[in-house]
Image (spheres, grey):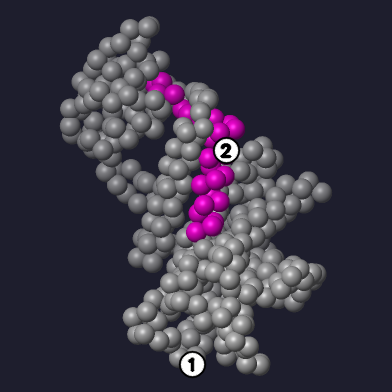
Amino acid sequence: MSSFLYYIIPVVIILGVLIIFHELGHFLVAKFFHVKVLKFSLGFGPKLIGKKIGETEYLISLIPFGGYVKMLGENTDEEDDPLSPEEEKRSFSNQHVLKRIAIVAAGPLFNLFLALFVFCIFYTVSGQQIIIPEIGQVTKNSPAYEAGIMKGDVVTSVEGKTTRTWIDVKDAVQDNAGESLKITIKRNGKLIDFTVVPEASVVENVFGEEVKHGLIGIVTSGKFKKLELGLWQAIGEGSKETWKWIKLTCLVVVKLFRGDISIKTVGGPILIGQMTGELAQKSLVYLIPLMAIISVNLGILNLLPIPILDGGLIIFLLIEIFLGKPLSIKKRELAHKVGFALLILLMVVVTWNDLSRIKIFEKILKFVG
């Protein structure tokens, strides 16, 4: 029962909210351009329940991981009867190509806007938890040790730039290997200046790559402090956090395509469920920023130029602008088949990766082998 409460319900709610918001983007922009929306579905496959309100049928379908908005004239080759002049005006295919691009791009962009909104609300309500720049340990014979820096010292600035958090200290030091730095610390209520030259050292970054960083031999005390933020401060921090995750997600995608990161590190719904369950058991509050992070990932991944995804359709529309006419139905069908095959392959890979992380599954593999 506890597994159901912590691992199933939260992930269903989070993914449901993200999918609804994604499809809401397509829906609202389509309505703004007076395009007729036939269906708004949460999930794919056979209909479980549905209700028609106005001209749109709202559905919950069998397969929960996804959703769709079906517009009139979206697939002209699937139309059984010719459209009336009034319906033709409101069909998706009859809209200017830039309007169609806006409708398609709205889904991923709404996910990014949702992440921004969630982060801003989170910082407004909860404030900001920071690791204070207090030194918890100084390595013997390190640059900091030789300079006279001690355990318990609080770093107030590096090269005159205020260090509010431990991250500020780390960033200031790691990018200046071999360069002389003026570090100001507070000790017993007094400010003292030290000159330290960071040593170049090879460390692993978050991607497991070896990079050179400057180190001076200090470790954080690990003490946290809560900062109350005003509305504009919260919006600023929420914007920075959203941009940080957008850049990180794009970087991960690039590194995956270049082969710098193994495909084995990629996770899917099962991994999301594990993370959600673990965080939910600690505190439901942790699920709020997690939802924002997943929303960023969903938005960026849907913009990838893969047929069947929003990014693939945007590429088709850009080609239409360049050629002055849409691609032939045969070429689009072929591209969609390739895109669908790639998507299925990706789902298989991420599911295998997720299952491989589960100890029970590893035991089954050993037993079968």
* Residue named by callout 2: 122
Q: Which structural element holds mark 1?
A: helix
At 38% from the left edge and 6% from the top edge, which residue is drawn?
188
Q: In which quarter of the image is residue 202?
A: top left
Task: Report x, y in % for residue 68.
Answer: 63, 70
Relative horizontal placement of residue 227, taking residue 57 as reference (left or right)? left
Q: Nearer the viewer, residue 178 or 41?
A: 41
Three-letter amino acid code at disc 1? Lys
Establish if 284 lies above or below 160: below
How many marks overall? Answer: 2
- Mark 2 is surrounded, within 10 Å at the Cα level, by few (under 14), some (14 to 19) or many (20 or more) other residues, namely many
Q: Position of residue 259 (x, y in %)?
A: 37, 65
- What segment carries the magenta color? 109-135
Q: Is residue 37 visible?
A: yes
Tell me where residue 270 appears, x and y as whole percent: 63, 59
Residue at 61% across, 40% down: 286
Query: Which amino acid lies under the numbered mark 2 shown in the image of this protein?
Result: Phe
Q: Position of residue 257 (x, y in %)?
A: 38, 67
Instruction: Say above or below: 133 vs 50.
Output: above
Residue under numbered circle 1: 330
